[in-house]
Image (cartoon, helix red, strand yellow):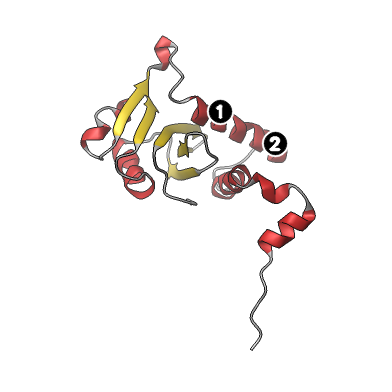
Amino acid sequence: MNYEILEKMVQLDEAYFKGISLLMAKQKGTRKLAYELIKGTSVERNDALNFLGQYIKPKSELKTDGAKIYQGIDKWWPVRHTRDIHKRFEFSNTSEIEGTFGNLRTFIRRMYHHTTTEKMPEIVGEFCFRFSFPEIFDNPHEYLERSLTLVPFD
């Protein structure tokens, strides 16, 4: 599920849960997210390339960690790629996406206490919606105004 194509400066990373992997990107300085859930406990290079093709605008600046799946990715998709090496305690390029994963894990723990592989798509979708559009939960009037639409009467 994706709300917009991400552009300019994008942070990309992966997170792992029991039986499922999450590939997520965040446009730096905004609340725009794109994600894809992948069955299994690993993300392959072709998963990352497919994700880039779907959700990242060409000529964007891509920030990742030092995982092997991202090495040389700028040769296969037209982005300017820089990476952090977490073993060297470099986190400046991926701090926002790492924080987003922390928020996701806290959301799951506080809202649902735990989750199953089968429920992850719904839970991650709900999290991304709440994260991307926090103003909708400011008050009931705002929520109703944004969620209800009039049906044309013939």
- Disc 1 target residue: 99
Residue 61 visible in the shown view: yes
Q: Residue at left 29%, top 40%?
A: 59
Relative to 93, say whether 47 is above or below.
Answer: below
Please name whichever residue, 66 or 96, is drawn nearer the observer in this view of the structure. Answer: 96
Q: Position of residue 40 (x, y in %)?
A: 42, 39
Quadrant assignment, res 104: top right
* Residue for point 34% across, 43% down: 52
Q: Is 97 positioned to the left or the right of 80 in the image?
A: right
Q: Secondary structure at mark 1?
A: helix
Q: Indicate the quadrant where residue 94 lies.
A: top left
Quadrant of the image containing the C terminus: bottom right
Q: Tag on residue 140?
A: none
Which residue type carries mark 2? His
Labels 2 and 1: the sequence-earlier one? 1
Against 96, residue 37 (above or below) is: below
Q: Nearer the viewer, mark 2 or mark 1?
A: 1
Q: Counting other residues with Cα less than 10 Å from the Cα at mark 2, is it few (<14), some (14-19), or many (20 or more)?
A: few
> What residue is shown with label 2?
113
Q: Is residue 128 shown left or right of residue 63?
A: right
> Residue at horizontal 40%, vertical 35%?
9
